Amino acid sequence: MTILLCTEVEEQFSSYLDGTLSGVAMADMEEHLRHCAPCTHSFAEWRATVDVLGTLGPAKPPSMLALQLRVAISQQQARTPRAMLAKLRMTWRNSFAPLAVQASAGLASAVLMLGALLLLVGTLAAPEPAAARDEPIGMASPPRLLYASLPDGSNPLGTLDGSVVVRVFVDAAGRVYDYRVLSGVEDKRSQSALANEMMWSVFVPAHVFGEPVRGSVILSLAGVSVPG
């Protein structure tokens, strides 16, 4: 026969009551309970508690338990990668896709407006070259030379040797703001004479729809050859 400690006995109360112990273990338990008053008292209290619990019957689940379980299962399923991807697709379709379409339309409109503006600015800033004193064609006209003379009344072309072909850029006020020599002007004296000519030249500016704008015109200038 095995001598059991009180702690070992208390640990086997449930198995002893259910009759699941072996015959030898059952005999050891009975022997210990016959000679140990504290364990006998503890076993009696434990057995009484079990008897009371047995009279309560099965516990009824809360009325909302089934709904709470279904909600918990649905939430857990919503955390799967496939469900999250579907949620992202729905969010994109309902929130970001309309904004993307609007942004694309706005960008296309902005690009179209910018292209039209650049085309208009290019047309106004650099009209096609035309000979001086050409008559206006349609709604646009190139610059026209009015006169060119120094403050003392002399003609700067008097010191220009030979002929010069030059493209002149005229602002909306009829003054030259730049020029490009296309042919002629090989010596410094002719270059100085041409610079004076451009500085003191007065033009009728180019017009588009009646409004003065920047423009350009090609001039053929000839001076009197002066022996050096």
Image (cartoon, rainbow, N blue to C red):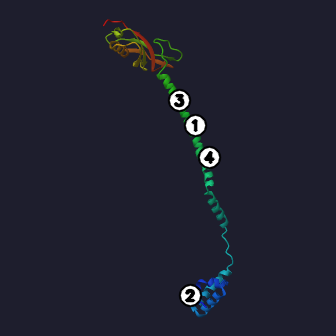
Q: Earlier in the sequence, mark 2 or mark 4?
A: 2
Residue 172 position, x and y percent, is 43, 20
The correct choice, above or below, for 161 with respect to 42 in the image is above
Tell me: 208 left or right of 53: left
10 Å crowding of disc 3: few (<14), some (14-19), many (20+): few
- Disc 3 is placed on an element classified as helix
Kind of residue at badge 2: Cys
> Could you give the CA–CA distance between mark 1 and mark 3, rounded to whole angstroms?
15 Å
Residue shown at 50% from the left, 27% from the top: 118
Residue shown at 64% from the left, 83% from the top: 15
Nearest-to-viewer mark from 2 and 4: 2
> Could you give the CA–CA distance between mark 1 and mark 2, rounded to whole angstroms?
86 Å
Q: Earlier in the sequence, mark 1 or mark 3?
A: 1
State the residue position of label 3.
115
Proximity of marks 2 and 4: CB atoms separated by less than 8 Å: no
Please state which of residues 23 and 75 is positioned toward the viewer in this rendering: 23
Kind of residue at badge 3: Gly
Q: Quadrant of residue 79?
A: bottom right
Q: Quadrant of the N terminus?
A: bottom right
> Could you give the CA–CA distance between mark 4 and mark 3, rounded to whole angstroms?
32 Å
> Could you give the CA–CA distance between mark 2 and mark 4, rounded to whole angstroms?
71 Å
State the residue position of label 1.
105
Please state which of residues 160 and 199 is positioned toward the viewer in this rendering: 160
State the residue position of label 2.
6
